[in-house]
Image (spheres, helix red, strand yellow):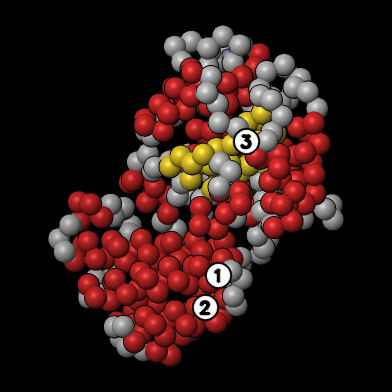
Amino acid sequence: MRFADIKGNEAAVEVLRSMADSGRIPHAMLLYENQGCGALAIALAYLQRLCCEHPVNGDACGECPSCRQMAKLVHPDVHFVFPVAAGSVIKDDHPVSDMGIGAFRELFLRNPYFSEQELYDALGVEGKSGNISVYEAKNIINQLSLSAVAGGYKAVVMFLPERMNTQAANKLLKILEEPPAKTVFMLITQNPEDVMSTIFSRCQGLRILPFDRSQLVVSAYSEENAALWNPLCGALLKKDLYAALECADAIAALGSREKQKAFCNFASEQIRKAFLCDKGLEDIAYVTDGEAPVRGLSSRFCLKAVSSIDRASMLIGRNVSAKMVFTDLVNRLFVNL
Ligand SMILES: [Zn+2]
């Protein structure tokens, strides 16, 4: 991955490129994005530039041995850390990223914009979220204590640091603050508000924006979510609370918290589209083929609904019972009709 391969985000790429050019390399950076904006790809383009043996015009050459290793995610001095859990790929009681690195590489090479749920699917993890544990933190410290194989930079790429538990974070604080020479941490979060403040405060932040709004929305559309959302709207519009609560049960029965959160994102997006379409602003609603935003929802309802859905998503993220969260959500939607 070279800077030249990155779509959009010119400003962020320019910041990273000038850091690399000037040699003023922050030892820890936190890139934050909404899911699917390509922050991981941008982080890798930056590291490839830093590790390249013959950079050309501020970008990696793409041809030297280091670039070839980076392109396959097999550079010996670049370590990948991501949330893991035991599943069909990792069977160990103390799962760490190295055990699932093959699946991670394959996933990234197939689609650099993958979601957290797609990561769990690739790891064969069902019905739970992964985490970054203290075993992982020990692993990172061990790897960084060895000298760089290629003699240049060493890097830790941490995808979703919001999945780190307190014990792991505490263990990493010192090395994040004072890493060995020529060591770079690149953290990529999709929920900056959930990253521990002790970690956040030790990193230089950089916002990564969606590269193409319409593409992002297409990826957010899912038949599975539509099959839950449309009947719920139908029940709400008919003021049929009983049917609406049955929909809540069906949403709560989605296989994992990630799927439940994805449903919340989907529902917010659908309300935004419905709102824009009702205002005659189809042009900026990016309604895709086969998609039919529910009509007839009042503006007041849309605004209240989006904040209720955000609340539900936040509670799901905090492990509150899904049945309780979605029953409450449906009741809130119902009273705001
Ligand atoms: Zn190169």
Residue drawn at (25%, 55%) of the image: 285
> Label 1 belongs to which residue?
316
Question: Circle 2 sits in a helix, a strand or a loop, which is it?
Answer: helix
Residue drawn at (40%, 74%) of the image: 308
Question: Circle 3 sits in a helix, a strand or a loop, which is it?
Answer: strand
Dot label at residue 152 = none
Task: Using the numbered discs, state the Cα–Cα distance from disc 1 to disc 2 in whole angstroms.
Answer: 7 Å
> Label 2 belongs to which residue?
325
On the question of residue 149 being in view, the answer is yes
On the question of residue 90 being in view, the answer is no
Residue drawn at (32%, 66%) of the image: 271
Question: Circle 1 sits in a helix, a strand or a loop, which is it?
Answer: helix
Question: Mark 1 is on which residue type?
Answer: Ile
Dot label at residue 185 = 3
Which image quadrant shows ligand 1?
top right
Question: Mark 2 is on which residue type?
Answer: Val
Task: Using the numbered discs, state the Cα–Cα distance from disc 3 to disc 2 in whole angstroms.
Answer: 36 Å
| Neighbours of disc 3 within 10 Å: few (<14), some (14-19), many (20+) | many
Position of residue 333 relative to residue 284, above or below, is: below
Question: Mark 3 is on which residue type?
Answer: Phe
